[in-house]
Amino acid sequence: MNVPRLGDVIEVGDQNYMYGTGHLTLRVTCIGGRIYVHDDEWLNVEGLALRTDGSQLGQKPRPALVRMRAVRIAAPPPRWSA
């Protein structure tokens, strides 16, 4: 099971976060508590929503309750060397 940390970028399908309305990509800024609903573990997170190209959607963090077993931690972007 992937447990997100501060700064991770997570991806979650709409069926795997409470009241989902499309694919969710967040840069995690706050991690809250875990809860259990119908034998499934969920995690309260807050983060900055990202577009598919990785750019930030807004300045205000967005809360989300995500299903732990469905959280995918995205690979960090490649670093450019000079």
Image (spheres, rainbow, N blue to C red):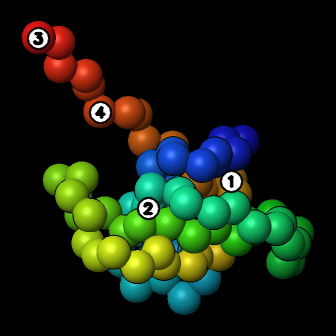
Q: Secondary structure at mark 3?
A: loop
- Mark-to-mark CA distance, 3 and 2: 29 Å
Dividing the picture into quadrants, the one containing residue 32 is: bottom right
In the picture, the quarter occupied by the N terminus is top right
**Which one is in front, 6 or 3?**
6
Residue 19: x, y in percent? 54, 88
Please, is residue 80 above or below residue 50 in the view?
above
Q: Which residue is mark 4?
A: 77
SS for callout 2:
strand
Q: Disc 2 residue type?
A: Leu
Residue at 58% of width from left, 76% of height from top?
A: 64
Direction from residue 35 to residue 5 in the image, left or right: left
Residue type at tag 1: Arg
Depth check, mark 3 against mark 2: the one in front is: 3
Q: Quadrant of the C terminus?
A: top left
The residue to which callout 1 is attached is 69
Question: Are dots 3 and 1 in contact, CB under 8 Å?
Answer: no
Mark 3 highlights which residue? Answer: 82
In the rendered image, residue 75, in percent from the top left (x then y), is placed at: 40, 34
